[in-house]
Every structure is written in structure tokens, then in C-alpha cells.
Amino acid sequence: MHNILMIIRREYRERVTKKSFWIGTAIFPLLMVGFSFLPMLLIGLGGNDQKTIALVDGTGKLRDRLVHELADEKLKDGKLRYVVEDVPVGANADEARKPLEQRVRDKQIYGILQVSPDIEKDGAFQFYARTVGDIKSVEEFHSALRRAVVSLRFENAQIAVDKSVIQKITAPVDMQTNEVSNAGGSTKKGFTEAYFGTFMFVLILFMTLLLYGIAMMRGILEEKSSRVMEVLLGSVSPNELMTGKILGIGLVGLTQVAIYALTAGAVRIYFASQANAEMAGFLSNFTGGKMAFFLIFFLLGYFIYTAMFACIGAVCNSEQEAQNLQQPVQMCLMLPMMATIFFVGQPDSTISVIVSLIPIFTPMVMFMRICVQMPPMWQIVLSIVLTTAATWVLFRGAAKIFRIGILMYGKRPTIPEILKWART
């Protein structure tokens, strides 16, 4: 026990006393917020230039309506954001459109809208542009076109209705969503708060599990290549060394998570004191219960993945050799994160329940389900029991692999050989 405590103290001090630990701890939340909100911010800032759209109107009745609907979209200097250029259609609309495509490529016009004479048939409205990735512009133009077409449909149906009445009838319905809590009551919360609140925790889990796992692997590789490992093994056993390293680096991770939890708690208390109803949905992601579950699943995930990374470091002689072996482990972390939108949307589906009970995926998937909709307690307890049992089995195999692999140099062992070591 004394030797394990000595290794824990060495690993903890070596990392926590470095400036890079504190700089990384401070920068990581900022990067996370930047990755989450920067794309939306850039979308809102972009596109401050006038766009000309050529209209190939087969109905001959849409131009004035479209110009009217786009009149409210203006640039900062007061100019119209969209200019509609009417194009004579002639006998064939496609023949009228094709010459305009070269003007699109030359950036003389932003896009082409081709409208069929029969606006009720499928594919009656076709938009051509050099890029369709400008979501803000496409959505604005699409919204104005929808209102213009509704007005035209009223005229075709010979229904005399004032335009202001049409706008009132066709105005979008603003539906507020509320999350009903198991403890009673409800909180105003939309998909954005649910998704980003969950994704933020998932990203922290993913980054910490991956970074500390790789840190463990690289530490073992460095000590193995510099022969420091042989000196350490002169004083402690391989099992004590592996256990001490995992617990020591785990304490470093807990220190970082504790800093984030305290910061999140302070932010929650501050915004709660402002009595801001708009923030209620977002703040509901930072309850004490969720933070406790985050700590539990962080520890479960840490021990599973760090044990696997420790094995990889023990059986390899260089980072180049370790890259191939660590890819499957990294994929096990990446798959749940890439499927976050599914688990947030369908937290109680059969697939979500099954995947959340598979120990390798439990830390991330079960926590996603807890963030969105609290699962039955028996599922949470079962997932913790299964993951704990799997961790115990994995640790036993990892200790055997570590004991043999740590003193092997030269040719990297094959997968069958590694599995054979784990069974001995």
C-alpha cells in the first residue's frame, strides 16, 4: 500500500504542479463554448452584402409579390439586401435559365429562382446558386418566397383578402416548450437548451477521458523507452505501479472536474439570483443531482479507458506503434458523442436503453439519458453494476498484460498474444 501511495503522490504532483495543467484547465471551457456557439455567431455576422437574384418566373405574377416580401430585408447602410432581376421567360424556362448560370459562376448574381407556370406541381420552385451553404440567406429568401406564393394562391383562388390579413393568417405559431420534471412542476426548455446542455457535458467527458488516457499511455511509453520503468520496478511490483499510475492520474482528473463543478455551481448561483426566466432551461442542466451523476460516470469511464490505454502503452515501444492500437479505443469514445443528437431526441428508445447498458458506452450514453430525461432508477443502478463488474474484469486482464508487456522490448506482440497474456 505504501508503494502505491508513493506512485500516486509522484504522478499527482508531477502533473498538477505544471503550468500546462492550469492553463489547459482555464482554456478548455473557453474552447468548448467557442466550438458550441462560434458557428452560430459567424452565421449571424456573415452575408452583409447585396445579393442579386435572377427570377425566371413562369407564372408572370410572382415578381412584385417577392420584391414586396423582401423589402424589409436591408443592409446596415439601409440598402436592400436582395435585388430581384426579372428575366424574360420566353417559350422555354430552362433555356432562359441556362445562360444565367455563367453569371452565377462569375459572381455577377447570387442565384437563380426558376418558377414553373403551375406552382402546385412537384418541383415548381428551383433555386440555383454557386453555394447553398449560406443558411441565413437561403432561409430569408425561402421565407419571403413562401409568403409571396401564399398571396398568389389567394389570388388564383379568387379570394379577395387584404395582404395584412394574409400575413396575420399565415404568421408562424410560436409554441413554447416546457420540460415536466419528475419531482413536479415544469421548466421552460427547448431543444437548444437540452442539446447544448447535454453536449457540453458529453464533450467534457470525451475530452477528459481521451486526454488522460493518452497521458497515461505516453507516460508509460516514455518511462519504458528511457528505462526509468526498470528502475521503478526495482522498488515496486508491476501491479502496484499500474494501480498507482491510474489512481494518481485519476486524482488529477478529479481535481480538474472539481474545478469545473465549482465554476458551474458559481455560475448557476449567479444567474439564479438574477431571476432570469430565459436562463431557467439552461440552468436546469447544472443541478446537484446531475453533477453527482457526472462524477460517478466520469470515474467509471476513467477506469475503463485508462486501463485500456495503460495496456497499449505497456505492449508498445513507441507512439507510432501505439497509434494503430489506440484507434479502436478512441472510436468507442467518439461513437456516442457523434450520436448525441439521437440519444437526446430518443432517450428512452430501445436502442438507447440497450447501448446505455453496454459498459464501454455506459459512461457517456447513460449520462446523456440522465441529462435529457431521468431513466428508471433500476436502469441506472444496473448500468453502474455492469460497468463496475466489467472494470474489475478489465483491470485483472490489464494487470496481467501490464506485468508482461512492460518489460518486453523489440517486436510488438500480436493481438492473439496480448489476449493470451490476459488469460494467463
Image (cartoon, rainbow, N blue to C red):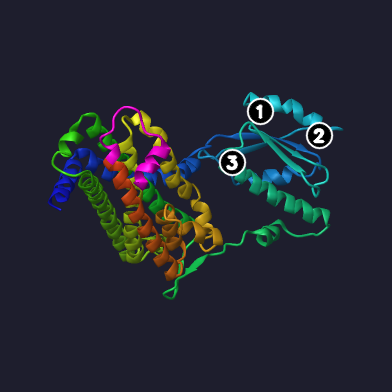
- Residue 104: give its label: 1
Q: What element carries label 2?
A: helix
Check if residue 405 falls in the magenta segment: yes
Q: Residues within 10 Å of mark 3 (few under 14, many from 20)?
A: some
Instruction: Tell me the CA gap for discs 2 and 1.
Output: 17 Å
- Residue 93: give its label: 2
User: Could you say which quadrant of the image residue 326 lies in?
Assistant: top left
Could you tell me which residue is drawn at 13 percent across and 41 percent down? 235
Three-letter amino acid code of the residue under disc 2: Ala
- Residue 137: give its label: 3
Q: Is mark 1 on a helix, strand or loop?
A: helix
Q: Is residue 294 visible?
A: yes
Q: Where is residue 144 in the image (x, y as percent from the top left)?
A: 66, 47
Q: With respect to residue 159, does 111 lie above or below?
A: above
Range of the magenta residues? 404-424
Q: Nearer the viewer, residue 30 or 224?
A: 224
Q: Where is residue 70 in the image (x, y as percent from the top left)?
A: 64, 45
Q: With respect to residue 133, does 344 lie above or below?
A: below
Q: Which of marks 2 and 3 is nearer the N terminus?
A: 2
Q: Position of residue 261 (x, y in %)?
A: 29, 57
Tags 2 and 3 in contact by the CB under 8 Å rule?
no
Three-letter amino acid code of the residue under disc 1: Val
Q: Which of marks 1 and 3 is nearer the N terminus?
A: 1
Tags 1 and 3 in contact by the CB under 8 Å rule?
no
Q: Position of residue 129 (x, y in %)?
A: 65, 33
Q: Nearer the viewer, residue 168 or 39?
A: 39
Specify whether 94 is left or right of 352.
Answer: right
